[in-house]
Image (spheres, grey):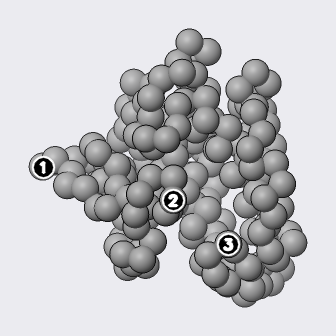
Amino acid sequence: MSTQGLEQAFDVARGVLANVKAEQMDDATPCQSWKVKDLVNHMVSGSQWFGRTMDAGKSSEDGLDADFSSQDYNQLFDEAAKNSVRAFSQDGAMEKQVTLPFGQFPGIGFMGLATTDVFTHAWDLAKATGQDTNLNPQLANELLGAAKANIADQFRGEDGKMPFGPEQQAPEGASNADQLAAFLGRKV
């Protein structure tokens, strides 16, 4: 199985992160409980977590609350992205069982979660910082199809407590990325 989708999601996120300005760190984001600074921190620590978790086969909370906003978060994100792709590229990675806080998944399922997380938070950051949210239409369409097939209502709820909010209505003519964001609970 190819890591192409994950690599594309990381590329999208790199492009958005590179355009974040220091004065935007206290701005609100579509993730109601996070400011831009919190979202940047989550994107870096989450990307580190994906690689670390894939390597170990189980989740660890280490480093998830670190503050990277005063560091070179672009470089840290890039390093974490490369490590995650490496971890998902190992022989047998797609079949490997990985234990997460909300269940056990084969590596291929975990990679799908990672890809959706990276891409969706890139959308959140683009929206929060006034960047174009029409991110990689082909990848967004693939992720939207996968999300509709795999995300059950049991994973939806209050911001900060559940992975996804209640599905929102995307405006007519919304981009694929905006439709994905709305499906995952973001107001578009």
Q: Is residue 65 above or below residue 126?
A: below
Residue 61 image point, x, y percent: 78, 59
- Viewport quadrant of the N terminus: bottom right
Residue 14 image point, x, y percent: 62, 37
Q: CA distance from mark 1 to mark 3?
A: 36 Å
Q: Amino acid at mark 2?
A: Lys
Pointer 1 or 2: first along the chain: 2
Mark drawn on residue 161: 2
Please tell me which residue lies in front, 70 or 179.
70
Mark drawn on residue 83: none
Q: Residues within 10 Å of mark 2 (few under 14, many from 20)?
A: few
Q: Which residue is mark 1?
A: 172
Pointer 1 or 3: first along the chain: 3
Residue 76 image point, x, y percent: 79, 37
Q: Is residue 103 above or below residue 110?
A: below
Q: Residue at x 64, y 81 (%)?
A: 103
Q: Amino acid at mark 3?
A: Pro
